[in-house]
Image (cartoon, helix red, strand yellow):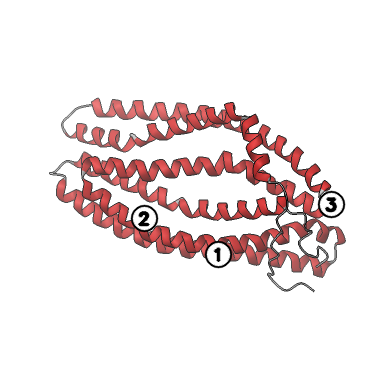
Amino acid sequence: MCSTLAVHAPAPAEGSSAADLLAIFRAHRARILLTYALLVGENLVGLAQPYCLGLAVAGLGIGSTAGLLSLAFQHLAATAIASARRVYDTRTFTAAYADLASRVIPDQRRREQHVSRVAARAAMSRELVDFFERDLSIGVQVGVSILGALGMLATYDVGLSAIALAAIVPSALLNHAYGRRASRFHAGLNDEIEREVAVIGRGEPGEVRSHFLRVAAWRVRLSDSQAINSAILEAALLAAMIASLARAGALADGDPGRIVAVFRYLMMFCVGLDGVPALVQQAGRLRDILGRLRSRDDGGDLAC
C-alpha cells in the first residue's frame, strides 16, 4: 500500500537526455538562434520605453511633442519585433518537440519502461522543449529587466542602483530555499503523473480518487510554497521601491519626467525579480524530468 505523498527518486542510467536535447538544438539551431535574436532585440528596445516616457512627460510640460514622437517610435518598433518573434517561434519549437518526442518514446520502450511511464514521460518531454521556448525566453526577459533597469537607474543616480541591488540579497536567499522545496514537491507530483495511465486503466473508484487527491495535495504544496515566497519577496521589493522613490524625488529638481522614468525602471526591476521564482521552480521540475528520462529502473510500484 502506498504511503501518502511518498516520493520515489528515479535511478540514473547510462546516456543523457540532455545530450538528446543538445542534439535537437543543433538540428534546429539556425531557427532557434534567430528566435533568440528577435527576443533580445525586443527586450533591448523595450528597455528604452521608460526613458522615452520620461522624455514625453517632460516635453509636455514645456509644450514639446518630440518626446511623444520618440515614445511612439519606440512602441511601434517593440511591437513589430515582438509580433515577428511570436509568429516565428511557434513554428520553430513545435517542430523541435515533434523531433524530441519521436526519440523519447522508442528510447523509453527500449529501456522496458511500463507504458504508463512512457506516456507520462513523452508528455513531460514537452517541458524540455518548453525550456527553450518559454523558460529560456523568460530568463532573457528577467535578465534584461534586472540588469537593464539597474544600468538605467545608475544613469539617473548610482544610489538608486545601490538600493535596488540590496533587494537582490534577500531574493537570492528566498529563492534558494524555495527551489529546494519545489524540487521535492515536483518529484512527488511526477511520481503520481507516471502512475496515472495505469490507475485510470484499472478504473477502481477508490484508487482513482486516492490518486487524484495525492496529485491535488502536491499541487497545493507547490502553490502554497510559491505564495509564501512571493509574499516575503514583495515586502522586500516594496521597501526598496519606497526608498528609491524617496531618493528620486529629492534629486528630481521638479522634473516630473525624471520621476516617471525612475519609477518605470524600478517597476521593471521588480517585475524581473518577481519572475525568478517561476524559473527556479521550473529548473527543479526539469531536473526531475531529465532524471526520469535517463532512468532504467521502474522506480516504484505502478499498482499502488
Residue closest to the far front: 14
Amino acid type at mark 3: Glu
Q: Which residue is mark 3?
A: 112
Q: Is residue 75 above or below residue 224?
A: above
Question: Looking at the rendering, in which quadrant would you find the N terminus?
Answer: bottom right
In the rendered image, residue 60, in percent from the top left (x then y), is placed at 21, 32
Inter-mark Cα distance, 2 to 1:
20 Å
Query: Mark 2 highlights which residue?
Result: 168
Residue at 20% over, 49% down? 248
Q: Nearer the viewer, residue 205 or 225?
A: 225
Specify whether 215 is left or right of 141. Answer: right
Q: Residue at x 81, y 42 (%)?
A: 106
Residue carrying label 1 = 181
Which corner quadrant holds the C terminus?
bottom right
190 and 17: which is toward the camera:
17
Q: Residue at x 40, y 49 (%)?
A: 271
Cα distance in 3D space between marks 2 and 3: 46 Å
Q: Is residue 66 left or right of residue 86?
A: left
Image position, residue 260 (x, y; %): 26, 43
Q: Earlier in the sequence, mark 2 or mark 1?
A: 2
**Amino acid residing under circle 1:** Arg
Quarter of the rendering containing residue 255: top left
